[in-house]
């Protein structure tokens, strides 16, 4: 194997992987991120709905570093002031809860820029694989070209090939009821400023999220 050596290699350049890279590199660790997509944040799978920092502080009162849960203003598509739950029988319950809808491409590009400014290396458009050994592991498109990391972060989402290769029970705890299939539609004319969550089998076998991304439903 002919690659470089790192303190930490992160497999997956989504919000979790990039956030890990930002803070690990800021602590002085040598960090490398592999992301299979050619553009950070595109195509979007899920995760655009993001509570504002004040709501997160209320939900997680013991977290001391709540300032890390934030987003730059230019990454915000739109804002929500409330959540409306629609029961299987059609009853609606609305309560205040402030959040914003992120432009994932802008948001993750921002995280990537911060990670790089902190000293992290990021390779995009690379389908990387984890090759474990007794003291860490190798990560790269092939075993021969892989980089070495003392710590490997599996941030490649479900199903995580990295976690499975590390021997973790990836598929056992994330069954069909723990994983959502996402289909994106654009509708206009209702619900501005509110996120609706519709429960019931008439819509989908589970629940349907409707947010006002880009001012539409």
Image (spheres, rainbow, N blue to C red):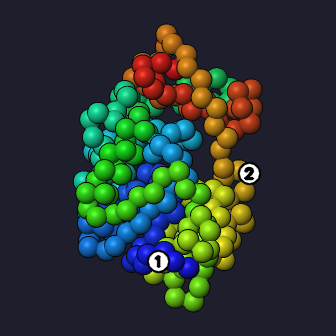
Residue at point 63%, 37% (across, down)? 182
Quarter that holds the N terminus:
bottom right
**Contact, mark 2 vs mark 1 (Cβ under 8 Å):** no
Residue identifier under label 2: 176
Residue 40 in the figure: left or right of residue 79: right
Question: Horizontal placement of 80 versus 41: left or right?
Answer: left
Q: CA distance from mark 2 to mark 1?
A: 32 Å
Q: Residue furthest top?
A: 189
Residue 43 at x, y = what percent? 54, 38
Place of residue 147 in the rendered image (x, y in percent of width and height, measured from the top left): 49, 73
Along the viewing direction, whichever of 118 and 4 lies nearer the viewer: 4
Crowding at label 2, few (<14), some or many (≥20) Cα neighbours within 10 Å? few
SS under mark 1: strand
Residue drawn at x 64%, y 32% as measured from the top left: 183
* Location of residue 217 with respect to 29 vertically, above or below: above
Give the label, 2 or 1, closer to the camera. 1
Query: Is 183 rendered above or below residue 132?
Result: above
Q: Residue at x 59, y 85 (%)?
A: 133
Residue shown at the point (34%, 50%) measured from the top left: 111
Residue 129 seen in the figure = yes
Which residue bears the numbered disc 1? 149
**Of the numbered discs in the image, which one, if any, rests on residue 191?**
none
Nearer to me, 10 or 49: 10
Residue projecting furthest to the bottom:
134
Q: Is residue 130 above or below residue 194?
A: below
């Amino acid at each position: 194997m002919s690659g470089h050596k790192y303190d930490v290699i992160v497999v997956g350049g989504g919000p979790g992987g990039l956030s890990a890279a930002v803070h690990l590199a800021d602590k002085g660790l040598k960090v490398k991120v592999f992301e299979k997509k050619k553009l950070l944040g595109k195509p979007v799978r899920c995760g655009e709905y993001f509570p504002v920092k004040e709501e997160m502080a209320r939900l997680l009162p013991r977290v001391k570093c709540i300032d890390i849960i934030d987003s730059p203003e230019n990454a915000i598509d739109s804002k929500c002031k409330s959540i409306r739950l629609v029961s299987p029988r059609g009853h609606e319950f609305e309560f205040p809860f402030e959040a914003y809808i992120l432009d994932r491409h802008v948001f993750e590009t921002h995280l990537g820029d911060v990670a790089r400014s902190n000293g992290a290396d990021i390779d995009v458009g690379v389908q990387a694989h984890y090759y474990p050994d007794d003291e860490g592991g190798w990560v790269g498109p092939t075993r021969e070209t892989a980089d070495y990391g003392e710590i490997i972060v599996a941030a490649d989402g479900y199903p995580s090939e990295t976690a499975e290769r590390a021997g973790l029970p990836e598929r056992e705890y994330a069954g069909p009821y723990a994983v959502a299939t996402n289909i994106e539609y654009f509708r206009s004319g209702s619900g501005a400023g509110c996120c609706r969550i519709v429960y019931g089998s008439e819509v989908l076998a589970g629940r349907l999220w409707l947010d006002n991304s880009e001012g539409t439903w």
